[in-house]
Image (cartoon, rainbow, N blue to C red):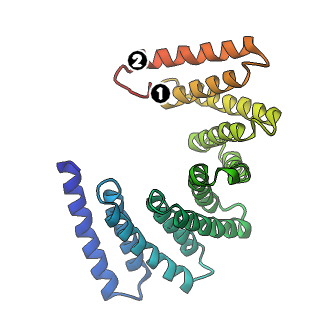
Amino acid sequence: MNNGQNAALDQAQERLEAARLYAETAPAIRDAKQDLIVSLDQVASFFEDSDWSAAVEHYRESLEIRRRLAEAMPDDRDAQRDLAVGLIHVAGVLGPSDPHAALGHYRESLEIGRRLVEAAPDDQDALRCLSVGMRKFVSALEAWEPETVPDYYLECLDISRRLAEAAPNDPEAQRNLAIDLHRGAFVLENSDPGAALGYLRESLKIRRHLADAAPGDHEAQRDLAVGLAGLGEALKTSDPAAASRYQQEALAIERQLADSAPNDREA
């Protein structure tokens, strides 16, 4: 970490000590425990890239507090959702060293998320929490249990679609749907190529809408290029002329991005 990051870590640790003291002196006050959870997570996030064991330690302590609160308040949706988030945090740092334990934490988080959504299907916070957990879980499965990925991808896509339909003017919700459609297409490309192609077309339509709405947004333009290239690749055999058009358009966008931001490595 650089000097600025070290200073920020020192401040976070000072806040953690204050939060820990508050929680110890006011054990019956829920806000005191919530403050401690937030402070532990902040310190853990600083350690993720520099001190893996410290990150795990802080996230686990946070998870233990979340679990006690959830067990004490089984009908409190916020407490249950907080537990699901804590499980995701621990799974994320455990993944490289203990994938089995990480998958177990992800699965427990998904079980909680599903229960919350089943009890209140229109709860957008619960849907978003389940979506985050499902995305991270699927990414982990791709590395460790790839044969189980397809069913989870489709569930992830269903959640993204529900969030996007509930927030048609939210660029993030729309972008997440486009990404999940794109990923779902590659999951289905061998088992159902027709559906896969439909997903790619739908993904591209969303990406183009977002790019048209924000012509100066490099991320939106880059997403459009990815969608064009993906559809072009999928059409190379069945419609080479269309494939070439899509790939040429993608290349033109990539060149434009490179010219407008020569120091942007992603352009």
Relative side of 257 to 39, left or right: right
Which residue is under mark 1? Answer: 218
Residue 15 position by quadrant: bottom left
Residue 171 location (% of width, % of height): 58, 39
Residue 260 tag number: 2
> Image point 25% across, 74% down: which residue?
17
Q: What residue type is labelled 1?
A: His
Q: Nearer the N terminus, badge 1 or badge 2?
A: 1
- Image quarter of the C terminus: top left
Residue 48 position by quadrant: bottom left
**Is residue 261 shown above or below 248?**
below
Are dots 1 and 2 in contact, CB under 8 Å?
yes
Residue 255 location (% of width, % of height): 48, 15
Q: Which amino acid does label 2 sit on?
A: Ser
Residue in the foreground of this view, choosing between 100 and 17: 100
- Find numbered disc 2 in the image and state the secondary structure of the residue it sits on: helix
Relative side of 77 to 43, left or right: right
> Image point 19% across, 56% down: which residue?
7
Residue 242 location (% of width, % of height): 73, 14
- Find numbered disc 1 in the image and state the secondary structure of the residue it sits on: helix
Residue 23 location (% of width, % of height): 34, 82
